[in-house]
Image (cartoon, rainbow, N blue to C red):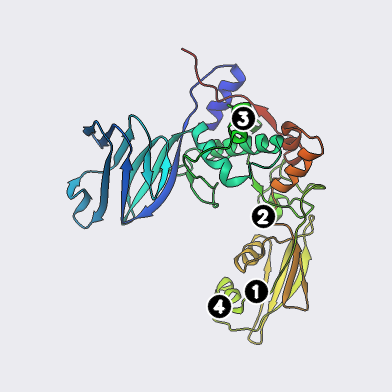
């Protein structure tokens, strides 16, 4: 799918922007409100049509799915004809698909790509950031979604920080709207496919290579200087119980930490964890996962006195640094230059363009 979309771009053809499937929740029961006229579809076609808004209570039981006290087949789709649907007090564009999976109900919002981007920006970058940084973030949000199309049989993305924070239909600051319009249909591409559009809050002054964080190498995700980022310092003395849980050991500590190696970007690459009971050695991605699990904002850190970590930055460090993008924009970089700085060798490709009738 991704290469097919890229081929359309190279040929100069147009196509409708794809829909994105966002997993909103996994739950045994929930309520959804349809604000206006809507259709409820079952697995074989429409089940019923409502001319006005309605509230539905859904519950998975051992006998099947109850909808307002009546058993209905799955999957179900609640499709607004006007207005939005409301779930957990939050409004969403597109429609809601309900699946029975793993003993629960999976709630999936199927939404137009550009509407999805509009739901991501407010959760990922403050509207007060420079306009060029907001445009760069819009391109990354769109690219991230496209790169994850069909990543799971039932959905493409989750709705939290494990993917991208997605807030649905929220009142948009005009600056977000302008950034989305200014970059509509544009993505970051590498060799004909959407690039790995990774980003984080603050690199601490030097971004990380994907290889050092996750053990996978990408030519455009290398360690880069990040001169204008915030470089916010922090200190953390980890809770021994959290350290034991991250080690998956019943070891009460106390623990002592020794950095044995650092990566090219200065991040902790190998770590020794000592306790009266045992010594644990962690390296590469395993060390990164452990450090994040015990609460370090970033692995760009060192150890003071064997017990306390001192460091800079926030996030995994790979790709675009959001505070760094703010600094670049404040120093006159436009959004293409910002993306070029963090993703060297990539190009901007206009391949998702709504077809004209």
> What residue lies at 60% left-to-right and 35% top-to-bottom?
176
x then y, percent, for residue 269: 73, 63
Measured Cα–Cα span from mark 4 to mark 2: 25 Å
Residue that carries the numbered disc 3 in the rendered image: 178
Is 325 above or below relative to 259? above
Question: Is tag 1's residue or tag 4's residue first in the polypeptide sequence?
Answer: 1
Measured Cα–Cα span from mark 3 to mark 4: 51 Å
Q: Which mark is residue 210?
A: none
Q: Residue 238 carries which label?
A: 1
Tag 1 and tag 3, C-beta contact below 8 Å: no
Residue that carries the numbered disc 2 in the rendered image: 316
Q: Element type at marker 1?
A: loop
> What residue lies at 73% left-to-right and 70% top-to-bottom?
309
Q: Can residue 36 be seen in this view?
A: yes
Q: Is residue 194 visible?
A: no
Tag 3 and tag 4, C-beta contact below 8 Å: no
> What residue lies at 44% left-to-right and 35% top-to-bottom?
111
Residue that carries the numbered disc 4 in the rendered image: 249
Question: Is tag 3's residue or tag 4's residue first in the polypeptide sequence?
Answer: 3
Q: Element type at marker 4?
A: loop
Residue placed farthest to the bottom in the image?
276
In depth, the one of 58 and 253 nearer the eye is 58
Mark in the foreground, 1 or 3: 3
Measured Cα–Cα span from mark 2 to mark 1: 18 Å
């Amino acid at each position: 799918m991704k290469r097919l979309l890229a081929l359309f771009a190279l040929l100069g053809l147009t196509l409708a922007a794809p829909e994105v499937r966002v997993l909103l929740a996994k739950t045994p029961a929930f309520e959804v409100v349809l604000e206006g006229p809507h259709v409820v579809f079952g697995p074989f076609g429409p089940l019923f049509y409502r001319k006005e808004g309605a509230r539905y209570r859904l519950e998975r039981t051992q006998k099947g799915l109850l909808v307002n006290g009546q058993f209905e087949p799955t999957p179900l789709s609640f499709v607004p004809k006007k207005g939005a649907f409301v779930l957990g007090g939050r409004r969403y564009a597109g429609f809601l698909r309900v699946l029975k999976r793993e003993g629960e109900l999976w709630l999936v919002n199927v939404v137009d790509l550009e509407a999805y981007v509009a739901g991501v920006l407010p959760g990922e970058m403050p509207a007060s950031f420079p306009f060029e940084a907001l445009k760069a973030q819009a391109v990354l949000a769109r690219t991230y979604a496209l790169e994850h199309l069909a990543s799971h049989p039932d959905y493409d993305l989750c709705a939290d920080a494990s993917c991208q924070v997605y807030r649905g239909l929220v009142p948009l600051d005009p600056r977000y709207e302008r950034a989305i319009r200014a970059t509509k249909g544009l993505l970051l591409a590498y060799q004909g496919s959407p690039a790995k559009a990774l980003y984080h809050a603050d690199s601490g002054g030097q971004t990380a290579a994907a290889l050092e964080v996750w053990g996978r190498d990408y030519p455009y995700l290398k360690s880069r200087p990040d001169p204008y980022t915030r470089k916010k310092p922090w200190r953390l003395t980890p809770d021994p119980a959290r350290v034991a849980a991250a080690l998956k050991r019943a070891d009460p500590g106390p623990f002592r930490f020794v950095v044995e190696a650092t990566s090219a970007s200065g991040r902790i690459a190998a770590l020794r964890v000592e306790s009266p009971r045992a010594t644990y050695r962690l390296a590469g991605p395993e060390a990164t996962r452990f450090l994040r699990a015990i609460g370090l904002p970033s692995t760009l850190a060192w150890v003071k006195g064997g017990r306390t970590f001192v460091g800079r930055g926030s996030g995994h460090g790979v790709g675009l640094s959001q505070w760094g993008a703010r600094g670049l924009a404040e120093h006159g970089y436009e959004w293409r230059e910002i993306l070029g700085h963090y993703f060297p060798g990539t190009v901007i490709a206009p391949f998702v363009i709504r077809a004209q009738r």
